[in-house]
Amino acid sequence: MLHKFLLLITLSLGCTLANAQKDCSRLKGLTAQQECWTVKAKRGEKQLKGAVLSAADLSGVSLKGANFESAHLNYTLLAGSDLRKANFSGADLTGADLSQAKLGKANFTGANLSGANLEGADLSGADFRDNLVHVDLSNANLVGADLTGAFLEDAFVKGAIISYSSTKGVEFSDWEYRGGKVID
C-alpha cells in the first residue's frame, strides 16, 4: 500500500520512484516526504541526513552506522533498534523512544534529546558532549560515554551506570541520590 502511494506521488511529480526515494526532500508535502524517508529507513538505508521521520515507528530496525545528521526524529519510536555508531549530530530527538536500543559509539553532539527515553539503552562509548536535560537514562549503560560538559538537569538516572567515561564539567553531586551509580 505504501509503495503504491509513493508510486502515485512520484508519477504525479513526473519523476521515477527510484529518484524520489533517492531524494525524499524533493517530494511535495510533508506527509509524502515522511512516508518516503520511513520506507528508506525500514529498508536499512543508512544515508538519512535531514530525514523527516517525526513520530515514525522504527522499533527494532537495524540502522547500524546510519547518518541521521540534522534529522527530524521527534517522537519517533526507535525502541530496541540497533543504532550503534549512528550519527545523530544536530538531530531533533525530542520525546523519541530509544529504550533498550543499542547506541554504542553513537554521536549525539548538538542533538536535542529533551524528553527522550533512553531507559535500558546501551550507550557505551556514545558521545553526548551537550545537554541531556529532561532525559530518561534509567538503567542505561554509559560505560565509556563522552559526557564532557553535559548538563544533566532533571535527567532520570535510576539504575544508570557511568564508568570509564569522560565527564569533565559534569555535575554529579546528586547522581547517586537520584539512583545512578558512578564507578571509577
Image (spheres, rainbow, N blue to C red):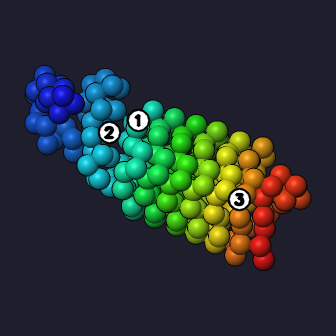
Q: For mark 2, what is the residue?
A: 38
Query: Disc 2 on helix, strand or loop?
Result: helix
- Give the vertical position of 28 relative to 126 (above or below): above
Q: Is residue 127 at least partly visible in the picture?
A: no
User: Contact (CB < 8 A) between labels 3 and 1?
Assistant: no
Which sits earlier in the primary sequence, circle 3 or circle 1? 1
User: Contact (CB < 8 A) between labels 1 and 2?
Assistant: yes
**In this picture, residue 151 sits left or right of residue 40:** right
**In this picture, residue 57 sits left or right of residue 36:** right
Disc 3/disc 1 C-alpha distance (Å)? 27 Å
Q: For mark 3, what is the residue?
A: 160
Where residue 144 appears, x then y in whole percent? 64, 72
Residue occupying image coordinates x 74% and y 47%: 155
Where residue 8 appears, x then y in whole percent? 13, 24
Q: Please give the label number shown on residue 56.
A: 1
Which sits earlier in the primary sequence, circle 3 or circle 2? 2
Which sits earlier in the primary sequence, circle 1 or circle 2? 2
Query: Disc 1 on helix, strand or loop?
Result: loop
Q: Quadrant of the N terminus?
A: top left
Foreground of the two, 42 or 151: 42
Query: Disc 3 on helix, strand or loop?
Result: loop
Disc 1/disc 2 C-alpha distance (Å)? 7 Å
